Amino acid sequence: MLRYLQILFILLFSLNSYAQSIGYQTGTASANLILPLSIETGIGDLDFGEIIVNGTSSRERILPKNGKEFIVKGEASRNITVIFNDVELTNHLWLSNNSGENGKLVFVPDVVLENSQSVESGDNVILKPNGLIGEVKFHVGGIIDVDATQPLGDYEGVFVISVFY
């Protein structure tokens, strides 16, 4: 019996020594802290003014340099993606106070950088260093096509330009 206990003790001791071996792996944790993006409006507007509807179709245009300026600031030398869409302009608000027909126009934006380089929705643009921050300016103009029988009224819509890293 003593011999049996000695063998059992040796077996248990040898199993315990294997259970004490240790293995490990490492992983790296990191973070890149950057400036948040901001976008603000600068000079100009997207007002086509008064358009006379005289039975002839017309294409009205605002050149980007004469339109609205948008200024984006963020981390210098980083790429940002720019998103914008065509805008439906309607005369619904005007009709609520006046009589007439519902109408709509489509504003097709023309977006360029300061150097007049054209920008399409979905394009990547680099934020140019300006001191400690990066900056890029967009100039927005565009066109509307006015039908010969376009319903009268004040047409309005909202142009949205979005940017993200």
Image: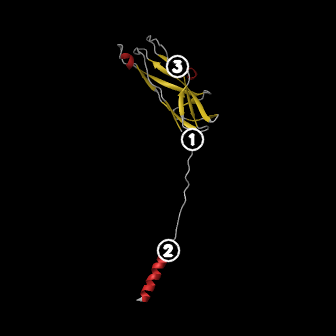
Label 3, label 1: how many angstroms apart (C-alpha)?
38 Å
- Residue type (three-letter) at the residue carrying disc 3: Arg
User: Which of the two discs, 3 and 1, labels the residue nearer the N terminus?
Assistant: 1
Tell me the quarter of the picture where residue 152 sits.
top left
Residues 32 and 51: in front is 32
- Residue type (three-letter) at the residue carrying disc 1: Ile
100 sits left or right of 15 in the view: left
Percent across and percent down for residue 64 are 56, 23
Tag shown at residue 18? 2
> Answer yes or no: do the residues labelled 3 and 2 have beta carbons within 8 Å?
no
36 sits left or right of 56 in the view: right
Nearest to viewer (mark 3 / mark 1): 1
Residues 14 and 77: in front is 14
Q: Secondary structure at mark 3?
A: strand
- Residue type (three-letter) at the residue carrying disc 2: Tyr
Residues 122 and 163: in front is 163
Q: Is residue 2 above or below residue 152?
A: below
Residue under circle 1? Answer: 34
Q: Is residue 72 above or below residue 53?
A: below
User: Which of the two discs, 2 and 1, labels the residue nearer the N terminus?
Assistant: 2
Label 3, label 2: how many angstroms apart (C-alpha)?
81 Å
> Answer yes or no: do the residues labelled 3 and 1 have beta carbons within 8 Å?
no
Other residues around mark 2 within 10 Å, as few (<14) / some (14–19) / many (≥20): few
User: Which of the two discs, 3 and 2, labels the residue nearer the N terminus?
Assistant: 2
Q: Is residue 40 above or below residue 165?
A: above
Q: Is residue 150 above or below residue 11?
A: above
Q: Residue at x 56, y 43 (%)?
A: 33
Q: Secondary structure at mark 2?
A: helix
Nearest to viewer (mark 3 / mark 2): 2
